[in-house]
């Protein structure tokens, strides 16, 4: 794993929080958000309203900014393609 990028899976569907490990539920506020297209787009600012689309983009962007301790939250959706940290 490159850097200390913490990943917190955020499930938007109601009632799914109990399925998360306690460490994931205990994470602090999200620094950036990711959601698959069409709502997610890597040209967005990475906010909850305008999320990025790919984990690779979030990882590269945060590491380039020196923000390797950031929390990335994922919204519901089908993620595919290369995803690495």
Image (cartoon, rainbow, N blue to C red):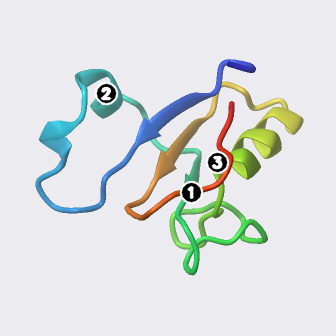
Label 3, residues with CA under 10 Å away: few <14, some 14-19, many ≥20: many
For the residues labelled 2 and 3, the Cα–Cα distance comes to: 21 Å
| Lateral position of residue 59 relative to residue 71, left or right | right
Q: Closer to us: mark 1 or mark 2? A: 1
Mark found first going from the N terminus, 1 or 3 = 3
Q: Are marks 1 and 3 in contact (CB under 8 Å)?
A: no
| Residue under the image location 37 percent in, 61 percent down | 76
Nearer the observer, 63 or 67: 63
Residue located 15% across and 61% down the image: 14
Marks 1 and 2 close (CB-CB < 8 Å)? no
For the image, the number of numbered tags is 3
Q: Earlier in the sequence, mark 1 or mark 2?
A: 2
Sort mark 2 into few (<14), some (14-19) or many (20+) by Cα contacts within 10 Å.
few
Give the quarter of the figure containing the N terminus: top right
Q: Residue at x 44, y 36 (%)?
A: 8
Spatial separation of the CA atoms under disc 1 and disc 3: 10 Å
Number of the label disc, if any, that sits on residue 21: none
- The disc placed on residue 26 is 2
Which secondary structure lies at badge 1?
loop
At x 42%, y 59%, the residue is 75
Q: Which residue is mark 1?
A: 80
Quarter holding the C terminus? top right
Question: Residue 71's x, y, as percent?
Answer: 55, 36
Report the disc number at residue 55.
3
| Viewer-nearest of discs 2 and 3 | 3
């Amino acid at each position: 794993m490159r850097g200390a990028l913490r990943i917190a899976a955020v499930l938007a569907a109601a009632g799914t929080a109990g399925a998360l490990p306690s460490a994931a539920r205990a994470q602090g506020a999200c620094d950036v958000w990711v959601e698959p297209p069409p709502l997610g787009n890597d040209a967005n600012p990475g906010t909850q309203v305008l999320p990025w689309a790919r984990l690779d983009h979030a990882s590269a962007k945060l590491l380039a900014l020196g923000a390797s301790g950031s929390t990335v939250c994922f919204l519901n959706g089908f993620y595919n393609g290369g995803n690495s940290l």
